[in-house]
Image (spheres, helix red, strand yellow):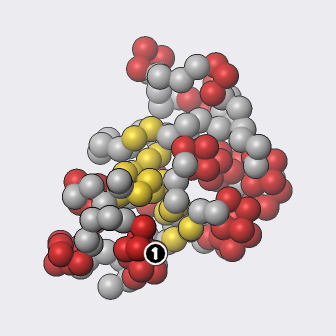
Amino acid sequence: MATKVYCEHSAFRQELFQMQQDEIVELVNFPYEQEIKKKHQKGQPSDAKLYNLKHHRLGEAHWQFTDFGGSDKFAQICQILGPRAHFDALHVDSAYKTGCAVFFSRDCGHILAKAHELEQLLGMRFYHPDTQGDDFLKFIRPINKRPVRRRAKRHAALPGR
């Protein structure tokens, strides 16, 4: 079974799409800020408002009204990230509600600066896509039933290698 990996819109990398094609990861995102053109699963919405959904066509939405609420951890996520990180909190909560094991972000100011606290609260790992590729691969190998090493050449360009 592929490991669910949430990527903020700026954190998607070609190597991750290749790992998804190899069924090592399942990429997840909820497009609060912008739509992602490449194939990935749409995550569960968090405490989104109508103006947060500008990148959705109403006929394509597969959520119910009751899905648009924060998780039981949303208030704590907001407290950790601070009042100026509303979209960051929505992304992190969407990842949590979707059951992701990993969260990729390039946001060193909010999300990655608070990664340790968020990991303790949510049980999810947080990585920077450009600098923590080795750490991600070490984390994912024991979880994933498919051997990552067999295709190491394909994934050799993963960040941090």
Outermost bottom residue: 161
On the question of residue 109 being in view, the answer is: no
Quadrant in the rendering for residue 121:
bottom right
Residue depicted at 54% across the width and 44% down the height: 98
Q: Amino acid at mark 1?
A: Phe
Quarter location, residue 130: bottom left
**Horizontal and vertical percent position of residue 120:** 71, 68
Camera-side residue: 86 or 16?
Answer: 16
Q: Nearer the viewer, residue 18 or 1?
A: 1
Q: Residue at x 29, y 45 (%)?
A: 38
Q: What residue did someone put label 1 on?
A: 139
Quadrant where the C terminus lies? bottom left
Residue shown at 47%/27% (left/top)? Answer: 56
Q: Quick check: 16 left or right of 32?
A: left
In the shown orientation, is residue 151 left or right of residue 131?
Answer: left
Q: Position of residue 3 (x, y in %)?
A: 41, 57
Between residues 115 and 55, which one lies in front from this camera angle? 115
Tell which of 25 and 110 is nearer to you: 25
Disc 1: CA contacts within 10 A as few (<14), some (14-19) or many (>=20) = some
Give residue 153's quadrant in the image: bottom left
Q: Position of residue 144 (x, y in %)?
A: 36, 65
Is residue 80 found left or right of 89 in the rendered image? right
Looking at the rendered structure, the secondary structure element under dot 1 is: helix
Residue at 59%, 62% (x, y): give it. 124
Residue 93 location (% of width, % of height): 65, 47
